Image (spheres, rainbow, N blue to C red):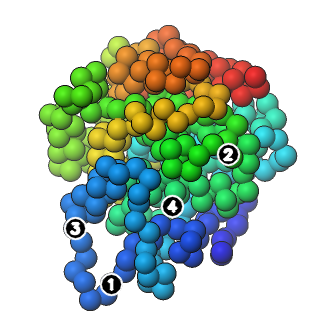
């Protein structure tokens, strides 16, 4: 495996080239075939989600799409904490947590999801099976054992699917932070899902039609509680800049993924210590439809509801978020 190492403070960042077929879910690269459309990629990803644990690996290891993931880590010998960012941000969104976790003695690792930030942006591979496999490869690359996975928003889906797909042998604990499980989409058998199919369609069309306007409004909602922005305008603009690092096909495919993936069976397999932390004024992933239901689905979990906190509580209410996280990690 080849990788390039650079060393910005406070992390060591590296681009890990995932190339060998046994380490990566690979996409066929057939030069004689017509490139599939984004719609076709999304359909394939959604089909993958419908059968958790049954992603299709490449059968042709000599013709693969190589995907590089940007990984940042603090180093050190402390117990590792792996941070998985929300949509459509990057590992940079975890800055408020890094110093607190390092000060508490933990080794901190974060990475940019495929299609986002500084990672490669392939045409497909945005279903949760593939994303959970990417998470496993990050753990392999960094040699992580006895690790706590912290999944924010969309990243909470990767935590749930990781447990279902790869088990808990390398895990110490997990954290679902403002996370999308158990199942956002409102359906006949999921009547408490907070996302109606009509709203999901409208959101997708809005992002397709005017990406710039969508991210402007999204970040306002992301950091607002009861209609009032809880961060500075400069901080919100920094978030917009992170959103703009996403590939449009990745943003759309991941929007489909986190909006339509059912994690209810995945959560049944979570047995390690679990923290559910959620803002009670979350306008993106409502507490009652997600955090509260995840807490009930994982009976042994601890629940922290942050009063007056929006979706982006790790920035707006960083002190409360960090205090609850470090307390849980140290237990």
Residue 120 in the image: state x and y as whole percent.
47, 65
Closer mark to the observer between disc 4 and disc 1:
1
* Among the two numbered marks 1 and 2 on one chain, the one whose residue lies closer to the N terminus: 1
Secondary structure category for the residue under label 2:
loop
- Residue 37's tag is 3
Mark 2–mark 3 distance (CA, rounded to whole Å): 38 Å
User: Height in image: 123 above or below 193?
Assistant: below
Which residue appears at 17% of the width and 49% of the height?
A: 209
Give the number of the disc on residue 99: none
Residue 191 percent across, percent down from the top left: 24, 23
For residue 319, above or below residue 7: above
Q: Earlier in the sequence, mark 4 or mark 2?
A: 4
Q: Hey, which residue is sitting farthest top in the picture?
A: 307
Name the front one of labels 4 and 3: 3
**Mark positioned earlier in the residue sequence (3 or 1):** 1
The alpha-carbon separation of the residues under discs 3 and 1 comes to 14 Å
The secondary element bearing badge 4 is classed as loop
Graded by Cα atoms within 10 Å as few (under 14), some (14 to 19) or many (20 or more), the crowding at tag 1 reads: few
Dot 4 corresponds to which residue? 119
**Residue at image point 72% right, 51% down:** 144
Quadrant of the snapshot with the N terminus: bottom right
Q: Earlier in the sequence, mark 4 or mark 1?
A: 1
Q: Which residue is mark 1?
A: 30
Q: Which residue is mark 2?
A: 169
Discs 4/2, front: 2
Q: Residues within 10 Å of mark 4 (few under 14, many from 20)?
A: many
- Considering the numbered disc 3 on the image, is that residue within a helix, a strand or a loop? loop
Front one among 257 and 11: 257
Query: What separation in Å lies between label 1 and label 2 (alpha carbons)?
Result: 37 Å
């Amino acid at each position: 495996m080849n990788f390039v190492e650079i060393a910005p403070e406070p992390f060591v960042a590296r681009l890990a080239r995932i190339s060998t077929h046994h380490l990566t879910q690979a996409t066929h690269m057939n030069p004689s075939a017509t490139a599939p459309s984004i719609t076709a990629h999304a359909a394939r990803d959604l089909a993958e989600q419908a059968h958790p644990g049954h992603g299709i690996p490449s059968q042709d290891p000599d013709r693969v799409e190589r995907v590089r993931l940007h990984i940042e880590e603090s180093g050190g010998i402390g117990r590792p904490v792996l941070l998985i960012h929300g949509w459509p941000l990057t590992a940079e969104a975890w800055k408020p947590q890094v110093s607190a976790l390092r000060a508490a003695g933990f080794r901190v690792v974060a990475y940019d999801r495929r299609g986002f930030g500084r990672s490669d942006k392939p045409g497909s591979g945005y279903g949760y099976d593939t994303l959970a496999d990417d998470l496993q490869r990050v753990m392999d690359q960094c040699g992580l054992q006895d690790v706590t996975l912290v999944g924010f928003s969309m990243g909470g889906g990767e935590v749930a699917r990781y447990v279902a797909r790869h088990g808990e042998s390398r895990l110490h604990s997990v954290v679902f932070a403002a996370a999308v499980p158990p199942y956002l989409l409102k359906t006949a058998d999921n009547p408490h899902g907070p996302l109606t199919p009509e709203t999901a369609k409208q959101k997708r069309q809005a992002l397709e039609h005017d990406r710039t306007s969508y991210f402007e409004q999204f970040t306002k909602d992301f950091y607002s509680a009861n209609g009032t922005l809880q961060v500075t305008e400069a901080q919100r603009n920094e978030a917009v800049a992170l959103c703009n690092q996403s590939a449009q096909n990745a943003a759309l495919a991941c929007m489909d993924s986190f909006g339509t993936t059912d994690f209810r069976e995945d959560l049944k397999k979570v047995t390690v210590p679990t923290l559910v932390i959620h803002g009670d004024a979350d306008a993106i992933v409502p507490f009652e439809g997600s955090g509260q239901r995840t807490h009930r689905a994982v009976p042994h979990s601890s629940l922290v509801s942050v009063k007056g906190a929006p979706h982006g509580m790790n920035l707006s209410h960083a002190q409360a978020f960090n205090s609850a996280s470090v307390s849980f990690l140290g237990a």
